[in-house]
Image (spheres, rainbow, N blue to C red):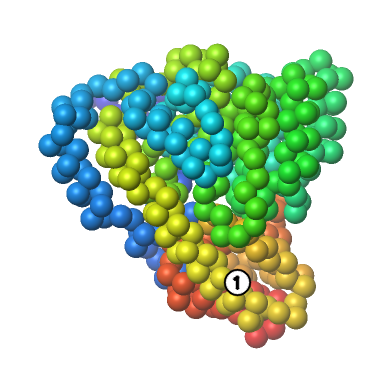
């Protein structure tokens, strides 16, 4: 009998499967058991999950008229009640009015982005993405095989001057740009929110160069301070913007529910890649029933939780690193702090010293589509308590000093 491990199959793989063959498959690793201070992954705070509320809601759902429908196949575009909740959420937090016809439910926001990529990307197509860019999206993009042209991010978000240069370059080459990918609120990993002027500029560029915008907004509700700005979808009037959202950050990542909000004419293109009889009809109903009754108060609680963690981490970092030329952003919301290491930091030594004190972080190169970022690290303050954010960030800062030859 042939040993299954000896069977060769690579020559039968599809062109898309061969892209990055052998690389890790996941876009989000589990919590690292060896880490005492988990600042690497953007994991929601387990203590913030509404355990009792979800249990009560589930029991109530199963005794209701919706119980049988929760355990059978679902609607092709996703549970109607959840699509209505998305509409309610946008109106509650942004004053944005959309139609149910603009919403399709997905298995989390990563899957939502993948639906948009599958609908519009062929291998070799050109797209423009932020640099740095969320590492999970980079994995997703690379699996679809486009040519990624990068545009830097500064304090106002994606640099639209460079976006224009990339679009003009593609026009000279006779190549379309399929879409521009951007995280508008609390950009992951670097933290800024796109300014209102930049938001208008990028929408204008999409119209001028006949391209689309893929707007990723996983954190928009988690604003600790500052002004809520209109989304690209709202500015555009629902013509060229595909907007991805999720319940992962405001309810729980394990519910695996996200969506695309897009021009209704595009929805069938996304639905063509949505298989399986509707996205999780059971959890969709549980999440909808709970959030319909508790969304505003629960999001308010989360804002207080995550603001305290951000402030604790910043305090620990600055207590140790003040006086160096370190650059540390102060995000107005979201989960992440982005740091440019002080000059002279030995990154290999830092990795060793951080591991010794069991502090986990993510090195900058993970977020750059075309290389670079060695002088940066990303810290997630979302998972640990404020006390551990403070303690762990001080330990990491001390390791940074030691990696510069200063203790």
Compared with 200, 309 (above or below) is below
What residue is shown at x 40% (from left), y 30% (from top)?
84
The C terminus - image quarter: bottom right
Compared with 254, 72 (above or below) is above
Where does the image place residue 235, in percent across and percent down from the top left?
68, 32
- Please tell me whether mark 1 sits on a helix, a strand or a loop: helix
Between 292 and 308, the residue placed more toward the observer is 292
Categorize mark 1 by other alpha carbons within 10 Å: few (<14), some (14-19), many (20+).
Answer: some
What residue is shown at x 63% (from left), y 66% (from top)?
348
Where does the image place residue 379, in percent across and percent down from the top left?
56, 62
The answer to which image quadrant residue 51 occupies is: bottom left
Q: Which residue is denoted by mark 1 in the rendering? A: 314
What residue is shown at x 69% (from left), y 83% (from top)?
406
Total of numbered circles in the picture? 1
Between 19 and 102, the residue placed more toward the observer is 102
Residue 125 seen from this side: yes
What residue is shown at x 27% (from left), y 25% (from top)?
2
Q: Position of 227 compared to 388: left or right?
A: right
Residue 352 seen from this side: no
Between 376 and 252, the residue placed more toward the observer is 252
Where does the image place residue 230, in percent across and percent down from the top left?
64, 40
Q: Position of 5 compared to 357: left or right?
A: left
Residue extending farthest to the bottom is 407
């Amino acid at each position: 009998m042939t040993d299954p491990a000896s069977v060769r199959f690579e020559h039968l793989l599809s062109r898309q499967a061969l892209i990055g063959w052998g690389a890790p498959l996941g876009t989000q690793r589990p919590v690292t058991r060896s880490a005492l201070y988990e600042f690497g992954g953007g994991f929601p705070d387990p203590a913030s999950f509404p355990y009792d509320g979800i249990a009560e809601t589930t029991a109530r759902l199963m005794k209701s008229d919706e119980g049988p429908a929760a355990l059978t196949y679902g609607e092709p575009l996703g549970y109607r009640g959840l699509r209505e909740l998305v509409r309610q959420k946008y109106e509650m937090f942004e004053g944005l009015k959309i139609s149910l016809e603009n919403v399709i439910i997905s298995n989390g926001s990563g899957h939502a982005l993948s639906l948009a990529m599958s609908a519009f990307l062929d291998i070799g197509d050109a797209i423009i993405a932020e640099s740095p860019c969320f590492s999970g999206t980079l994995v997703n993009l690379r699996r679809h095989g486009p040519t990624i042209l990068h545009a830097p991010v500064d304090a106002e978000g994606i640099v639209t001057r460079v976006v224009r240069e990339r679009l003009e370059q593609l026009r000279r080459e006779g190549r379309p740009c399929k879409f521009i990918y951007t995280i508008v609120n609390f950009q992951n990993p670097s933290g800024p929110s796109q300014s209102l002027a930049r938001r208008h500029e990028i929408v204008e560029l999409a119209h001028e160069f006949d391209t689309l915008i893929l707007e990723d907004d996983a954190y928009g509700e988690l604003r600790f301070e500052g002004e809520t700005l209109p989304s690209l979808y709202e500015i555009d009037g629902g013509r060229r913007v595909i907007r991805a959202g999720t319940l992962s950050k405001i309810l729980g990542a394990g519910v695996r529910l996200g969506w695309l909000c897009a021009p209704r004419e595009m929805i069938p293109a996304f639905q063509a890649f949505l298989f399986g009889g509707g996205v999780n009809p059971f959890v969709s109903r549980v999440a909808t029933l709970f959030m319909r009754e508790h969304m505003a108060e629960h999001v308010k609680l989360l804002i207080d939780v995550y603001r305290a963690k951000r402030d604790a981490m910043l305090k620990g970092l600055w207590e140790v690193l003040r006086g160096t030329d370190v650059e540390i952003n102060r995000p107005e919301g979201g989960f992440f702090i982005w740091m440019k290491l002080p000059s002279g930091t030995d990154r290999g030594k830092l990795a060793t010293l951080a591991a010794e004190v069991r502090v986990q972080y993510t090195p900058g190169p993970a977020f750059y589509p075309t290389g670079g970022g060695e002088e940066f690290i990303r810290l997630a303050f979302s998972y640990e308590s404020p006390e551990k954010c403070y303690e762990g960030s001080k330990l990491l800062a001390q390791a940074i000093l030691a990696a510069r030859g200063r203790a």
